[in-house]
Image: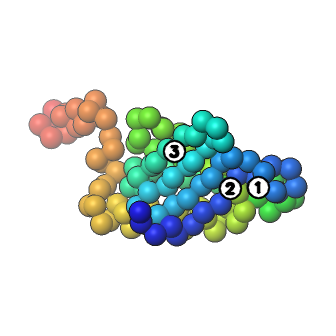
Amino acid sequence: MADVVWKDRKRIIFGLPWTFTRYSMTQDKLIIDTGFISRKEDEIRLYRILDITLERPLSQRIWGLGTIRLNTADKTSPEVSIKRIKHAKAVKEMLSDMVEKERDEKRITAREFMGYDDLNDMDDVEHGV
């Protein structure tokens, strides 16, 4: 397994990590492990992340927490939330930098995430119509 560059747990009351949701990030993927008896591990490749949003409502700011919402090009997980984590702003910045690095290394541009129908809209431009 690749080296883990960040890990945390979803937190609840008073910012304490008393949940069974664990988050970890390597150089190329985000892993969300949930459950106690029945466990589920969801893996999202960083280059598939399209948009990152940080939410910090008052109830989370009081305890130094935040939630990061991700829109991805992943069919099974188009929307992912990293809920109620410590140092959310720093994690968001680190995640954003790592996503860009992965896209650069794999030579992926935003155009490669467009749907087939979006590409057909360019026919008029290319053919001078």
Dot 3: within a 10 Å radius of its alpha carbon, few (fewer than 14), some, or many (20 or more) residues? few
Residue 60 coordinates in the image, percent (x, y): 81, 53
Q: Which mark is residue 17?
A: 1
**Quadrant containing the N terminus in the rendered view:** bottom left
Secondary structure beneath disc 3?
A: strand
Q: Is residue 13 visible?
A: yes
Residue 109 coordinates in the image, percent (x, y): 31, 55
Q: Are marks 3 and 1 in contact (CB under 8 Å)?
A: no
Residue 62 coordinates in the image, percent (x, y): 87, 58
Dot 2: within a 10 Å radius of its alpha carbon, few (fewer than 14), some, or many (20 or more) residues? many
Q: Earlier in the sequence, mark 3 or mark 1?
A: 1
Q: Is residue 55 visible?
A: no
Q: Are marks 1 and 2 in contact (CB under 8 Å)?
A: yes
Determine whether 111 is above or below 101 in the image: above
The residue singled out by tag 3 in the image is: 41
- Outermost residue toward the front? 37
Residue located at (57% from left, 66% from top): 6
Q: Which mark is residue 9?
A: 2
Q: Earlier in the sequence, mark 2 or mark 3?
A: 2
**What amino acid is found at the position of numbered circle 3 in the picture?**
Glu
**Left or right placement of residue 33 versus residue 10 in this view:** left
